[in-house]
Image (tube, helix red, strand yellow):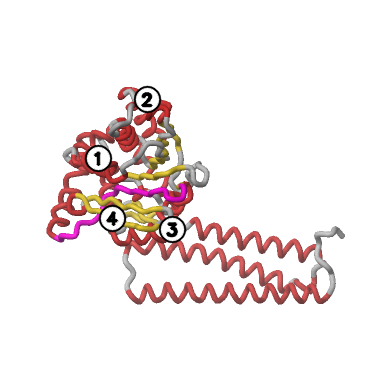
Amino acid sequence: MSENQPSTSGASIQNTKADLLKKLQQLKEQELTVDKQISDLEAAGVKESDAVDIMNALHAYNEIKDVISEVFNVLIKLNQTTSAELYTNIQRSSVALETAKEKAEQEKSTHFGFESVKESEKAKRVHEVFENVAGNYDLMNDVMSVGVHRLWKDIFLDRLGPRLNTKLLDVAGGTGDIAFRYLKYLFNLPNVSRDEVMLSDSHVTVCDINGAMLKVGQSRAEKLGFPASLIDWTEGDAERPPFGDGEFTAYTIAFGIRNVTHIDRALSEAYRVLKPGGRFMCLEFSHLNNSLAQWAYDQYSFQMIPVLGQLVAGQWQSYQYLVESIRKFPNQRDFCSMIEEAGFRNVTYENLSLGVVAIHSGFKI
């Protein structure tokens, strides 16, 4: 018998039996809890949008029931097997349980606009949306906002107020709008020459999950004549940015965080990559305080924007998603709370255009 195989002593087998019975009881309790929760939902009248979540939960726990049956089989044969066979059966049960747990995790759902989808599916579908609109993204922004998005971004950079030697990480900024404004801001600093900017540690890294958007940004940078030494273009996920701890003094994300599957993870990663004293800033569509203005805005968003998307970019569904994703995003105060939960302090927000968009700010202190 190898060193890794369990002892054949009666005490060891009894202990194993007790452990398995304990785990079995825990599984039964979990199953009863889930069954009760589902019964309560059905009694309360489940919304159609919740149906997928309930089916996923049932699917996951049906698989766990199979694990319970396997544990039963192990218990029945416990006193009839050799130590080596028992060890193999227990290992098989453990693997089956872990597999069931992993599948349950994979079945978690989230929103894709107003549609409920698996979390793993959302990232793929968001990627497809921006792959489809990349070539006409800037034009559509102009059409949809009548050019006002440019003013919003100018105000955003003005509120950031970067200084010489600022190391900026701009996430979800593939087309370069924020990066270019950052460089223009530095080149226009009073009493600072272009050569001083070039020789300083000032730098911007643009990180976007979509390679097509990055290509658009790189092409624009070349045409506009921005120094390549001051900009890096990196393909990466906001939830797993490929950067070390404390690399940047500022982090910006404009009109991108609502497309992230796990916003809390993106915020935690923003905190991680910032230096102490670093600043997080987010520009995002938000919610209007005036109900009449919100109604008018909704009418324009749902009746006009998808139509414009079809006419200008040939993409109705992509722009329908963009409109729906805005409505699913947390309101200003709730998003402030999420930023604080990630560790940021002095968290504030400022509404622009009555709250059509909002600037959120926080510091790593």
Q: Secondary structure at mark 4?
A: strand
Q: Which residues are magenta?
A: 275-291
Few, some or many C-alpha atoms within 10 Å of disc 4 (few <14, some 14-19, many ≥20)?
some
Given the current orientation, which residue lies at the most extreme front position?
Answer: 191
Residue 186 seen in this snapshot: yes
* Horizontal and vertical percent position of residue 92: 69, 60
Q: Exactly how many numbered labels are in the figure?
A: 4
Q: What whole-number distance in Å separates the C-alpha atoms at marks 3 and 1?
A: 27 Å
Determine the CA span between mark 4 and mark 3. 16 Å
Q: Residues within 10 Å of mark 1 (few under 14, many from 20)?
A: some
Tell me which residue sits at (45%, 61%) in the image.
56
Decide which of 189, 331 is in the foreground and name it.
189
The residue tagged 2 is 195
The N terminus: image quadrant: bottom right
Instruction: Between label 3 and label 2, give the one nearer the viewer.
Output: 2
Amino acid, disc 2: Asp
The numbered mark, 1 or 4, whose residue comes first in the sequence reads 1
- In the image, residue 360 lies at what x, y percent? 31, 52
**In whole angstroms, how far apart are the C-alphas of marks 2 and 1?**
24 Å
Say if the magenta span includes residue 253: no
Q: Nearer the viewer, residue 145 or 204?
A: 204
Residue topped by disc 1: 154
Q: Nearer the viewer, mark 2 or mark 1?
A: 2
Which callout, 4 or 2, points to the residue nearer the camera? 2
Q: What is the quadrant of the C terminus in the image?
A: bottom left
